[in-house]
Image: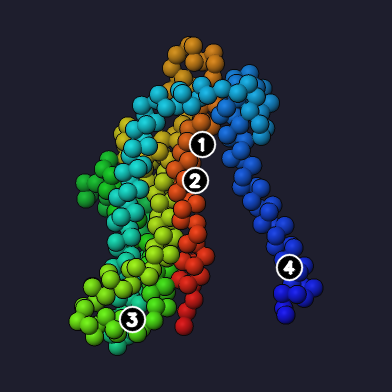
Amino acid sequence: MYYKSKSYRIFAICNTLLLAILSIMCILPMIHVLAVSFSGKAAVSGNLVNLWPIDFNLDAYRKTVANPAFINSILVSVERVVLGTTVGMLVILVGAYPLSKERNVFRFRSIFMWFFVFTMLFNGGIIPSYILITKLHLMNSIWALVLPGAVSVFNMIMLMNFYRNVPKELEEASLIDGANHLQTMWNVYLPISMPAIATLSLFTIVGHWNSWFDGLIYVTKPSNYPLATYLQTIVVEKDLSKLIQSANDMEKLTQRSIKAAQIFIAAVPVLIVYPFLQRHFVKGIVLGAVKE
């Protein structure tokens, strides 16, 4: 058996070590940020905090939760994630189904496919996109953050390949029973494609939650910033007064502690959602990548 050979065992060991090192490199910065957020001002200012809090306290989190700008940015991000994920998944569900059909069923499939792939490889750039959003009067609205990325061609291709692996007998049985293509997509394809939908939904959620650049160019009012954009401005901000407003807080906290607390709170929603959708990853991605 190939998995009992010496070369395979060496590959497995090297692969395991490499993945372990990469995992540690990903986890350590998060642990450091968490330790800084729980540490006292003296330890943080003296760069004494590594992976364990010193002078443990929750002042940074209390100050962060009491910040109305931070809470408002979370609400904007939640609205963006809900709308963006709903619109994005509906678009790729409707788009992937006809593109998964053979040419004798959908004659213009190749033309539409090349159109989508072309837009994935080439785009107009930032300036045409900014002009388009301005002309559509979407500036400072939530739709400026949702609509430009609504059609994810990569996700559509993944779901299209998943649909192509669905046994054709299921579709034929549905059509023979009198269902049309919309009913077949909804009643047959949708229930059995949940692993792919869960995987692509997580990709979309994380993408919207972490996206900051579009908020910076399409939203001119800081009060309407999504969370990632708000954190980006805070991280590069040198003015401590926007983070710590009272002299009493300034005696207890440092800028780094509050930044660390905000960054960790921003990561919590994704950390909560990930375990529930992670079990669909392997099946959703592998089946979506297999081609006949």
In percent of the image, x 27 and y 75: which residue is there? 184
Label 4 amino acid? Phe
For marks 1 and 4, the one nearer the N-term is 4
In percent of the image, x 60 and y 23: which residue is there? 56
In percent of the image, x 62 and y 35: which residue is there? 32
Question: Which quadrant of the figure has residue 228?
Answer: top left
Between circles 2 and 4, the one closer to the viewer is 2
- Residue 81: percent from left, percent from top: 35, 48
- Residue 4: percent from left, percent from top: 75, 75
Q: Nearer the viewer, residue 197 or 246?
A: 197
Q: Is residue 100 left or right of residue 45?
A: left
The residue that mark 4 highlights is 11
The CA distance from mark 3 to mark 2 is 37 Å
Q: Is residue 18 visible?
A: yes
The CA distance from mark 3 to mark 4 is 41 Å
Assess whether mark 1 and mark 2 are in contact (beta carbons under 8 angstroms).
Answer: no
Name above or below for residue 125 compared with residue 134. Answer: below
Q: Secondary structure at mark 2?
A: helix
The residue that mark 1 highlights is 264
Check the picture and name the quadrant holding the N terminus. bottom right
Label 3 amino acid? Leu
> Looking at this rendering, what residue extends furthest in the bottom direction?
104
Label 1 amino acid? Phe
Label 2 amino acid? Leu
For marks 2 and 1, the one nearer the N-term is 1
The CA distance from mark 2 to mark 1 is 10 Å
In percent of the image, x 22 and y 83: which residue is there? 177
Assess whether mark 3 and mark 1 are in contact (beta carbons under 8 angstroms).
Answer: no
Assess whether mark 4 and mark 1 are in contact (beta carbons under 8 angstroms).
Answer: no
The residue that mark 2 highlights is 271
Q: Secondary structure at mark 3?
A: helix
